[in-house]
Image: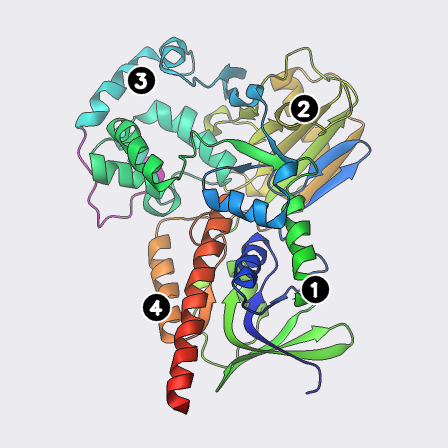
Amino acid sequence: MNNQINTDVGIIGAGISGLASAHFLNRNGIDVHVIEKNSAIGGSIRSERRDGFLVEYGPNSALDTTPILHDLFSQLGIDGSLEYASEQAKNRYIVRNGKLIPLPMSPPAFIKTKLFSASAKLGLLKEPFIGKANPEADESLAEFVMRRLGNEFLDYAINPFVAGVYAGNPDSLSVKSAFPKLYQLEQEYGSLIKGTFLGAKKRRKSAETSKSKARLFSFKDGLQTIIQAIGNELENNVSTNAPITAIRKNDAGYEVDFSGGERSMRLNCRTLLFTIPAYAYNDLRFEFNFQLHDVFAQIYYPPVTMVFLGFKQNPTDMPLDGFGFLVPEKETRQILGTIWSSTIFSNRALQGGAALTTFVGGSRQPEIALKPDDELTELVFKELHELMGLKQKPELVVIKKWEKAIPQYNIGHKAIIEKIEQFEAANDGIFISGNFRGGISVADCVKQAFGFSKRINAYLEKTSEHILNEAN
């Protein structure tokens, strides 16, 4: 085959995990080549300006939880266009009895809030004295919260929070896998309340920031700024519109055959880093014993649909003075929540206008996510009319359906990751990354990419030394 590319590391998938990994490896002087089957890089991250509005088709923002993010942005030269969320974005709302109730963000506000009953608040006094779970058990998030905090906090705090983060179900999510820091607080301190205060000192030493304290950020032109910057840096080391036709082992490492337009291409590499979603492995043809198809089939990705509404003026009499609101399942509504995008960041809407981003579906109501666009538009407008007093039609409607959106770290997920680790250990030079492992957020993916770049660098150095020793 004449159309061949030789490189150190072949990276399958050009989402944020693959691109960030390529960047970190490239900075270490390691040759990389990224293969992406779609026409555009970036995975679920896509930002677009339309009619004076900035639409985010995937994640709307990210949390500043690790210094690795700032290192990346500085290296890419995009730190100057960073934008942090407005002060108003600290205000969050939860729907209770059809009303938007502020989420208390301080002890005095918690005491006064109508979001939780007096008995639920008093029940927290018992939390430091509740015993730990069996560390061998894979407890659901719902079981964990019920045991430590009670039913009301599950219904009106954790349930909507999980809908906003995972589009998931707390009865199915594993606390150990989906919220490992929560689980570790109980195991290390015996109490969430004690652990929250005592764990702050440890986080300061590690330079990591808890998600509750982290600053929310984006860029002036949206999160796609990161994607464009890495894409420009990699230049010719990315192949798009490149479906893979075969993957095989050879004496030097691996061969990846893929379509490059009208040509058949082959990538020869010493190592392979996979960063694609779990379900995408079904599209790959392995010419060796790839033992993870059944494992990946266990990871559920519920459908989620984003409905963006753009208004030339504020469409409601209520002040849009916060991040937005989340809807508990107990409220039996047809949306998961709405982000007040134009309040959080500047330039998201026309001057004096408003941008609202609503999410529907998820594990809670997967069937709603797949409704026709006109029904979704009507449904969302009706919900926002009832909850926010929306009274005028939008100038812009943008709908994006993610049929397989966010991987669910459900009960049994730890066993899935252990099988992936066993496969990596048995197949030298194969590394498996992605947001089904190590966290689903942008920051989690970048942090994991940095870690994988270190692992791959160490592997390449080790195998190079072995080859030199063999030659001598």
Q: x%, y% of residue 95? A: 51, 20
Left or right: residue 209 compared with residue 143: right
The amino acid marked with disc number 1 is Thr
Residue at position x 28%, y 41% in the image: 184
Nearer mark to the viewer, of 4 and 2: 4
Left or right of 187 on screen, residue 394: right
User: Where's the N terminus, which quadrant?
Assistant: bottom right
Please tell me how many numbered marks the rendered image carries. 4
Please provide the residue range marked out in magenta. 130-142
The residue singled out by tag 4 in the image is: 422
Under circle 4, the secondary element is: helix
**Residue at image coords 70%, 62%:** 235
Q: Position of residue 205 (x, y in %)?
A: 32, 38
Asked if residue 210 is among those painted magenta in the image, a careful observer would answer no
Question: Looking at the image, is mark 4 or mark 2 earlier in the sequence?
Answer: 2
- Of the numbered discs 3 and 4, the one sitting upstream in the chain is 3
Looking at the rendered image, the disc whose residue lies closer to the viewer, 2 or 1, is 1
**Residue identified by numbered label 3:** 120
Between 8 and 136, the one lying in front of the other is: 8
Quadrant of the image for the C terminus?
A: bottom left
Task: Tell me the number on the disc at residue 240.
Answer: 1
- In the rendered structure, are the residues bearing label 2 and label 3 in contact, judged by CB atoms less than 8 Å apart? no
What secondary structure characterizes most of the magenta part?
A: loop
Q: Secondary structure at mark 2?
A: helix
